[in-house]
Image (cartoon, rainbow, N blue to C red):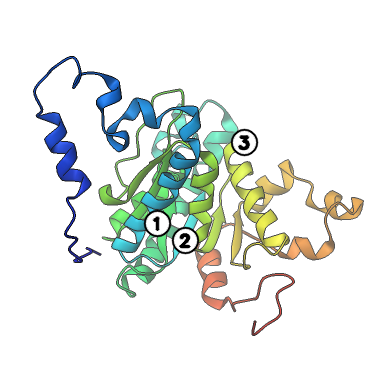
Amino acid sequence: MKDDRRSPLRDAGTDIDTARSVPETPQSMSPSYRLAFADETFLAKDELRPVRLQLELLKYEMLMDEHQIDSTVVLFGGARIPSPEEKHTARTQTLADLSHFYEEARTFARVMTRKAKETGNRHWVIATGGGPGVMEAGNRGADEEGGISIGLNIVLPHEQAPNLYVTPDLAFNFHYFAIRKMHFLMRSRAVCVFPGGFGTLDEMFEALTLIQTGRMRPVPFLLFGKDFWNKIINWEALADAGTISEDDLDLFSFVDTAEEAAAIIDAWVEQPRRGEIPGR
């Protein structure tokens, strides 16, 4: 949403353009002469970390507000899971066998995007990490349904780019994992976790911890692939050991299909945060 307020003061963008056209002298070419907010070297200094954190927090929030997106459906999942058409390229047979979850993510995103379009794309907008694999499937499904979707990418040592199905104006890039994960959850109305690796596990457990500790309101929390998740995590052992409570096992549900996931979301009744007194 454009801000139509007019300030009598000269704006920063104009000064950036003006500063680029000043005569070149030893003084004007010195790094010290650069405008602080237009000086990338200065902004990258260790001492400016608090400012960079704030900028990453603000940029996404401001653009989401401009697009009037109030809630999202978050898809976490492995970047290495291929589409069924490409499962022959998978590095292991297990990855090839998991390729059907690419299609489930794609189908689920189409269902949620139909729901989003009914709200004018204010709610239920698909949000992924913007990469390949399950993330691509989520953005692809939304695109095929004629809707919009969000991609929250992050700079990694190896070269990568957002997948081609992310809505271009909703493709974001982050430096800080913490801010990126915060943005995933700030507007989330449902969290769907597909099979994945360290990154997926990190995202899943952080979100579960926030709900468990009452820092986040419960939302439909859906783990796609019951056999996969029960094989890699012994949930019951955690409860038996007492390191989590039996009630914590109710924070999430296992599903295997897009239809199961959509049914749980449609039937969801909003709940207060743990420890929160209703009405306060």
Q: Amino acid at mark 3?
A: Phe
The residue shown at (37%, 28%) is 42
The residue shown at (14%, 30%) is 20
Q: Which mark is residue 73?
A: 2
Instruction: Give how far across and how far down residue 144 sits, in percent.
Output: 29, 55
Instruction: Give how far across and how far down residue 90 sits, in percent.
Output: 49, 29
Relative side of 81 to 40, left or right: right
Q: Amino acid at mark 2?
A: Val
Of label 1 and label 2, which has the lower sequence position? 1
| Observer able to see residue 161 | yes
**Label 1 Cα neighbours within 10 Å, binned few <14 / some 14-19 / many ≥20:** some
Instruction: Give how far across and how far down residue 22 sits, in percent.
Output: 10, 27
For residue 209, which quarter of the picture? Answer: bottom right
Of label 2 and label 3, which has the lower sequence position? 2
- In the rendered structure, are the residues bearing label 1 and label 3 in contact, judged by CB atoms less than 8 Å apart? no
Quadrant that contains the C terminus: bottom right
The residue shown at (49%, 56%) is 74
Give the residue pinned by disc 3. 198
Give the residue pinned by disc 1. 61
| Of the pair 31 and 175, the residue shown nearer to us | 31
Q: Secondary structure at mark 1?
A: helix
- In the rendered structure, are the residues bearing label 1 and label 2 in contact, judged by CB atoms less than 8 Å apart? no
Of labels 1 and 3, the one closer to you:
1
